[in-house]
Amino acid sequence: PRPFKDGAFAYPICSQILEHRKDPQQFARELRRVGAAGYIQSPSEIAERLFHWSSHRWYVNLVGDTLVLHPREPHEPFGELFDYLYEYNPAYYFFQRSMPDLFWVELEWHGNLSIEVRDESPLQLRDPETLREMVRPRTSLLGLLALFCASLVARLLRAETRAKLRALLRRNYL
C-alpha cells in the first residue's frame, strides 16, 4: 500500500529533497499522484559546485518549466571554503543573498511536473548573453542597500548570537 491516497495533498512543498532522491522521475510521479500543484526548491548546480554537500546525488537546473538534473560529480573542488565564506564573510554573504536565482532553483508547478535526467549540464556557461541574464540583479538598488546592511550586521555577530536570533525571529537563516 502507498503511504498517501491519490490527491491527498492540496499543495505539497518539497524543499531540498529532490537532489537526494535515487530516482527523481519516480519522485515527480509520486508528487503528481498526491497533489495537483506544488512547490519544489533545491540548490542550483552553481551552489552545488561551490558548497560542501556531499550527500546530494544530483545537480538541479531549471530550463523553462522543466527541472533538468544530471549526476553530481563526486569531488568537491573547494572543500568547505564557501561554507566558511557564507558563515563569516559579510561581502560574500551579501553577494549570495543578492542573487538567489544563481544559488537556488524554485519551481511552482500546476498539473504537470516535468523532470528530465540528462548526462550533462544544460548550463551555457560560455555564452555571454546567458551569463548576463544569470547575474542580472533582481532587486532594486534600495533593496540591495538594505540587504548589504543586514548582511554586514548579521555576519559581524557571533554564530551563537545568530542562532539565538534565528530562533527568536523563527527564520532558518540570518
Image (spheres, grey):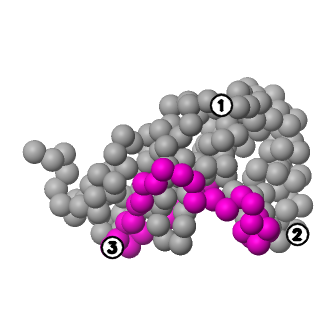
Residue 76: x, y in percent? 65, 31
Which span of residues is magenta-colored?
104-133
**Label 3 residue SS:** loop
Q: Along the horizontal axis of the image, is 46 left or right of 89?
A: left
Tell me the residue that label 3 is attached to.
111
- Choose between 91 and 148: the one closer to the eye: 91
Label 3, residues with CA under 10 Å away: few <14, some 14-19, many ≥20: few
Query: Is residue 44 covered in magenta?
Result: no
2 or 3: tag closer to the N-terminus: 3
Task: Give the residue at x 82% y 51%.
Answer: 95
Q: Tell me the kind of residue under disc 1.
A: Glu
- Choose between 85 and 131: the one closer to the eye: 131
**Label 1 residue SS:** loop
Residue 158: x, y in percent? 81, 28
3 or 1: tag closer to the N-terminus: 1
Task: Give the residue at x 72% y 43%.
Answer: 174
Give the alpha-carbon distance from disc 2 to disc 3, as whole Å.
37 Å
Give the alpha-carbon distance from disc 1 to disc 2, as whole Å.
34 Å
Q: Which mark is residue 76?
A: 1
> Which is more foreground, mark 3 or mark 1?
1
Is residue 139 at all visible to an observer of this figure?
Answer: no
Q: Tell me the kind of residue under disc 2.
A: Leu
Task: Give the residue at x 78% y 57%.
Answer: 98
- Choose between 124 and 3: the one closer to the eye: 124
**Label 2 residue SS:** helix
Residue 132: x, y in percent? 79, 68
Examine the rendered structure and indicate whether residue 107 appears above or below residue 169. Answer: below
Examine the image and state in which quarter residue 123 appears. Answer: bottom right
